[in-house]
Amino acid sequence: MIQRALAIARYWWSYRFFVRSAIRNDLRARYARSKLGLLWALVQPLAMVLIYTLILSHLMSAKLPETDTVYAYPIYLMSGMLAWTLFSEAVGRGLGIFVEQGELIKKVAFPRALLPIIALGSATVNGLALLSMMLMVFLFLGHWPDLHYLWMPGLMFLALWLGLSIGLLFGLMNVFFRDISQAIPVILQFLFWLTPIVYALSMLPPEYHSYFSWNPIAKLTAAFQDVILYRRNPTELHLVYLSGIAFIFTALSAGLYLRVKHELADHL
């Protein structure tokens, strides 16, 4: 059993240069002929933070519970935007990975299970770049990190895992039904506004709070806001809940892939 596991590990390790090259090529293709390159991945979330801060900062700062931080709302907003950007980026990478790598799938013999790793690597690079930029903003605002930031690697992985598992499931469907790639961004827009990122849940009447318990992304953004703004541990039950959802979507994606893997090349 151990020998078989080691043999599988060596087999996967032998493709490490292929995965590294595929991630690098993916990033280059996304920012080809761009002077700013990866910085464009930071512009949209930071622009949204700036717009909402300028418009809502005075109103929202007094509405955030359990904090007396001067720049509470910008930090609250950036924390939620970080979680959302990681999640939505991973969804997008998973959604498009099979179609975007269609020529590779049809012409090159390699384990198709490496595609999620390539998508995860690309999303991770963008996520780390965004985190680095936001940390610089936090330091500029005088909001220094503490020991609770030790949760950040795990939370980032959870956000990427959850988004990628969902994206891969719909990405496989997208190979056969291309309308899915048009529908998912619309659904994500609705989901963004159904998640307490721009506003605080405390602003809404209590009778509506129960509806947000069904939104896993609300729990995800709350975990980032707990660590970054409120300097406290995230709710462990929420992390277990999110991990369970990610595992379910991962299993569904794997099951669907095994069912349609022989038909992928014909539809790409």
Image: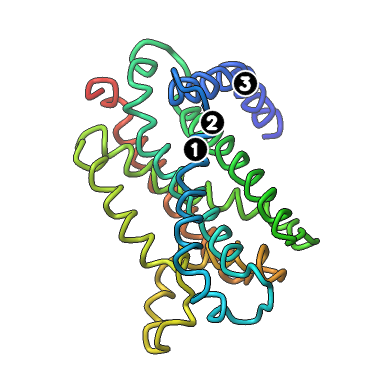
- The mark that comes first in sequence, 3 or 2, is 3
Q: Secondary structure at mark 2?
A: helix
Q: Residue 177 placed where, x, y %?
A: 19, 37
Q: Quadrant of residue 20?
A: top right
Label whose residue precedes the other's in the sequence (1 or 3): 3
Judging depth in this view, the residue of 53 and 89 nearest the camera is 53
Against 33, is 138 above or below? below
Which percent across, then down, holds residue 25?
50, 18
Horizontally, residue 167 falls left or right of residue 147, namely left
- Up-down relation of residue 258 to residue 130 (above or below): above
As drawn, the residue found furthest toward the top would be: 107
Q: Secondary structure at mark 3?
A: helix
Asked whether 125 or 171 is in front, the reply is: 125
In the image, taking residue 123 as reference, residue 258 lies left or right, namely left
Q: Which residue is mark 3?
A: 16
Q: Which residue is most to the right?
A: 147
Give the spatial CA distance, label 3 vs label 2. Answer: 23 Å
Residue type, numbered disc 2: Leu
- Residue at 46% across, 49% down: 163
Mark 2 Cα-neighbour bin, 10 Å: few <14, some 14–19, many ≥20 = some
Residue 117: x and y in percent read 53, 32
Task: Report the residue marked by disc 2.
Answer: 38
Identified at 54% across, 58% down, the residue is 243
Give amino acid for label 3.
Answer: Arg
- Tell me the mark number nearer the camera, choosing from 3 and 2: 2
Q: Are marks 1 and 2 in contact (CB under 8 Å)?
A: yes
Disc number placed over residue 41 in the picture, else none: 1
Tell me how many marks there are.
Answer: 3
Given the image, on which type of amino acid does mark 1 rest? Ala
